Image: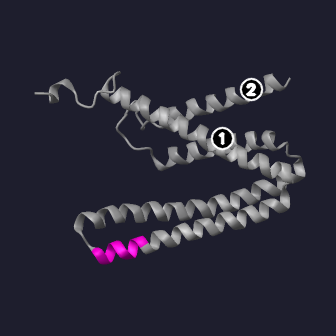
């Protein structure tokens, strides 16, 4: 029974991964050079979140009461975390531009802002963990730590494989960096 449940879990996860890979393409479906639209990015995020909730419920063996307390808590912190991470990405882009134009005042301001964002992110993680400890048993807390590590690793692996596949499709099966026309 347990093996069949794990097989179903992994099957659903990989079906979701294939759907995510399919959503990585532009409106034409095979436009490998186009960026992911905001709508598609949101669909991908929602699919990953659905898979995460489902797998987390199973991994922590949550009952209805615990799930009803845990998931709104996680959503609240995920939203705040996303906002801070968005600010960090935006500031890192500006930092790259500041490096190119050699503007020390701008660089200093941006580095201070990024440092503050990282402090806010850590404080947010600390507050979230304190609240989660009031909802989860010690065993569930331990399982949550392991789950997060493994789930993030799985997501990074899927993203990496998707990028490699897209690169191969745009550069050839051997992943050639230059086309034959570019080589003298």
Q: Residue at x 65, y 45 (%)?
A: 149
Tag 2 and tag 1, C-beta contact below 8 Å: no
Determine the image quadrant of residue 179. top left
Q: Residue at x 79, y 40 (%)?
A: 59
Of residue 25 and residue 10, the one placed in the foreground of this image is 10
Determine the image quadrant of residue 35. top left
Determine whether 2 is above or below 51 in the image. above
What crowding class fits label 1: few (fewer than 14 Cα within 10 Å), some (14-19), or many (20 or more)?
Answer: few
Image spot of residue 103 (x, y percent): 26, 73
Residue 106 on the magenta span = yes
Bounds of the magenta span?
104-111
Determine whether 42 is above or below 24 in the image. below
What crowding class fits label 2: few (fewer than 14 Cα within 10 Å), some (14-19), or many (20 or more)?
Answer: few
Residue 35 vs residue 180: left or right?
right
Residue at the spot of label 2: 8
Quadrant containing the N terminus in the rendered view: top right
Residue 177 appears anywhere in the view: yes
Residue 92 on the magenta span = no
Image spot of residue 104 (x, y percent): 29, 75
| Residue 150 tag number | 1
Between the C-alphas of marks 2 and 1, the distance is: 17 Å
Dot 2 or dot 1: first in sequence order is 2
Residue 152 vs residue 89: left or right?
right
């Amino acid at each position: 029974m347990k093996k069949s449940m794990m097989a179903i879990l992994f099957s659903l996860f990989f079906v979701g991964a294939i759907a995510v890979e399919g959503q990585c393409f532009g409106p034409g479906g095979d436009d490998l050079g186009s960026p992911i639209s905001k709508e598609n990015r949101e669909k991908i995020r929602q699919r990953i979140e659905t898979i995460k909730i489902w797998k987390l419920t199973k991994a922590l063996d949550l009952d209805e009461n615990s799930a009803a307390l845990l998931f709104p808590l996680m959503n609240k912190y995920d939203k705040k975390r996303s906002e801070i991470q968005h600010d960090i990405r935006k500031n890192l882009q500006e930092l790259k531009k500041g490096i190119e134009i050699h503007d020390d005042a701008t660089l200093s301001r941006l580095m201070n802002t990024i440092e503050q964002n990282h402090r806010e992110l850590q404080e947010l993680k600390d507050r979230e963990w304190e609240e989660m400890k009031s909802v989860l048993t010690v065993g569930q807390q331990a399982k949550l730590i392991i789950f997060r590590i493994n789930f993030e690793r799985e997501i990074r692996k899927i993203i990496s494989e998707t990028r490699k596949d897209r690169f191969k499709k745009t550069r050839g099966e051997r992943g050639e960096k230059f086309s034959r026309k570019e080589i003298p």
